Image (spheres, grey):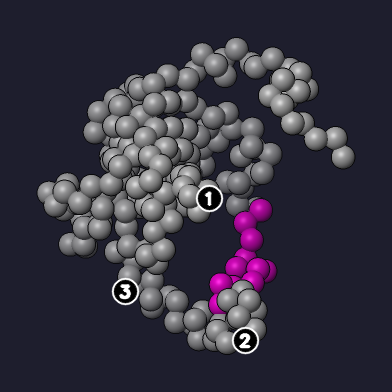
Amino acid sequence: MNVIRTVEELVAHYDIPVPSSLTKEINYLTELHKAYIDASPFVLMATAGPGGLDCSPRGDPAGFVRVADERTLLIPDRRGNNRLDTLRNIVVDQRVGLLFLVPGIGVTMRVNGNAHLTTDEPLRESFAIANKPPATVIVVEITSVYTQCPKALIRSKLWDADGFRDPSELPTVGEINELITNGEFDGKAYDDGYPERVRQTIY
């Protein structure tokens, strides 16, 4: 197996960058960039820390990521499982990478920056849903913004309903946990109870 081990080898193996892929990157949000963020109900957040890398999904009604100004984003940290993988990383390494998706749209929006967490009560309350504010708000100071071309979503047919899978075709979370615990975890009880748990804990 031939392995690329240096940046020089990597660059030599590929063609030169498409010029527009370089000129499109700026360090602030325009109103046109903001339109994608306002329309997005889903963002992937990548972080790094002593324990390794993490990429976690964040979702809420479209526009849940708030544009405070052209260089600042505010992201509510909704109720989860309290592993805190992303938040632990941010506390020790502020670098974050965001990928915004808009249903049905191939172009995605990428934002890189440095983040910190705030427990400011008025700010948290401003993000409340069903009278439940997020535990913290992630403040992202933007360093880089650019659109990502739709080729990956075109190739994957991500938004093509004809390719949607039925949940019955894949193992459930309960089945996976039961397998990796050699049957100590009651997978069926977990799966059967999940819809009600979601209803009670979504916010």
* Mark 1: amino acid: Gly
Q: Residues within 10 Å of mark 1 (few under 14, many from 20)?
A: few
7 is higher (above) or lower (below) than 173 = above
Q: How far apart are marks 3 and 2 (CA)?
A: 27 Å
Is residue 39 or residue 137 the one in the foreground?
Answer: 137
Residue 56 shown left or right of residue 170 in the figure: left
Q: Which mark is residue 183?
A: 2
Residue at the extreme front:
50
| Amino acid type of the residue tagged 2 in the rendering | Gly
Horizontal and vertical percent position of residue 73: 30, 36
In the rendered image, the residue lying farthest to the right is: 1
The relative height of residue 101 versus residue 51 in the rendered view (above or below) is above
Considering the image in quadrants, where does the N terminus appear? Answer: top right
First-in-chain label (1 vs 2): 1
Q: What residue type is labelled 3?
A: Gln
Q: Which mark is residue 77?
A: none
How many numbered marks, from 0 up? Answer: 3
Seen from the viewer's position, the closer of residues 140 and 149 is 140
Q: Give the range drawn in magenta.
A: 163-174
In the rendered view, would you say 100 is above or below 144?
below
x, y percentage for residue 149? 57, 28
Image spot of residue 35 (x, y percent): 36, 31
User: Closer to the camera: disc 3 or disc 2?
Assistant: 2
**Magenta-span inclusion, residue 69:** no
The secondary structure type at the circle numbered 2 is: loop
Q: Report the disc number at residue 52.
A: 1
Q: What element carries label 1?
A: strand
Q: How crowded is mark 3: few (under 14 residues within 10 Å), some or many (20 or more)?
A: few
Residue at the spot of label 3: 200
Q: Residue at x 32, y 53 (%)?
A: 77
Residue located 76% across and 23% down the image? 9
Residue occupying image coordinates x 47% and y 20%: 25
